[in-house]
Image (cartoon, grey):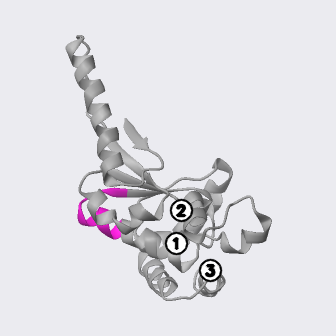
Amino acid sequence: MRLMFPMIATLDEFRRAKNLVEQAGEELSSSGTDMMVRFQIGIMVEIPSVSILADRFASEVDFFSIGTNDLTQYTMAAERGNKRLAHLNDPCHPAILRQIDQVVRAAHARGKWVGICGEMGGDPEAVPILLGLGIDELSMSPARIPRVKRIIRKWSMADARQVATRALEQENAEDIRRLVNSSPPI
């Protein structure tokens, strides 16, 4: 069992939430119900402050799940429902990829896992980059699973790492998507 807190913005906020879980466990124990299972407690990375402080969070959380829809919206100041800002709402933008990279590096340095939650996890052009950045888990709608599995099988880790490294050097999402489409093997 895992427990994940959404919309965490600060370390203090996470600590307070985790403390409430611990208090609930103590209350259960004192009432005669023993919490026999230790479960992982993690957070959604949806706010840029968390990716910036990922190294600090990584020492306290058990895992990260990057909510790419909200992270993109808040990083790019582009509300998802606003059609006039739709061109800014691409999770393959280098600002988003760099945040993902930062979270993965911080988490893996502490032996923690990182998942992707949001449309990006099922985006065929994003999947090779996410693999190359070291994402441990992808979440997506069931209809996208067969295609994503085919893409994952086609890419070697070396090629995925190479395209991810090159993607981090690009200036915009269009160049990144063009890079993935021109790279083997998609």
Q: Are marks 1 and 2 in contact (CB under 8 Å)?
A: yes
Does residue 155 appear anywhere in the picture?
Answer: no
Label 1 packing within 10 angstroms: few (<14), some (14-19), many (20+): many
Which residue bears the numbered disc 3?
173
Front in this rendered view, residue 56 or 141: 56
Which residue bears the numbered disc 2?
71
Which residue bears the numbered disc 1?
96
- Residue 101 coordinates in the image, percent (x, y): 41, 72
Examine the rendered structure and indicate whether residue 19 appears above or below residue 186.
Answer: above
Q: Is residue 132 magenta?
A: no
Discs 2/3, front: 2
Label 3 packing within 10 angstroms: few (<14), some (14-19), many (20+): many
For the residue labelled by badge 1, is the local secondary structure a helix, a strand or a loop? helix
Residue drawn where x is 62% and y is 59% of the image = 119
Farthest residue, direction top = 32
Instruction: Name the kind of residue labelled 3 in the image.
Output: Ala
Question: Which image quarter holds the N terminus?
Answer: top left
Instruction: Name the kind of residue labelled 1 in the image.
Output: Ile
Q: Which residues are magenta?
A: 104-113
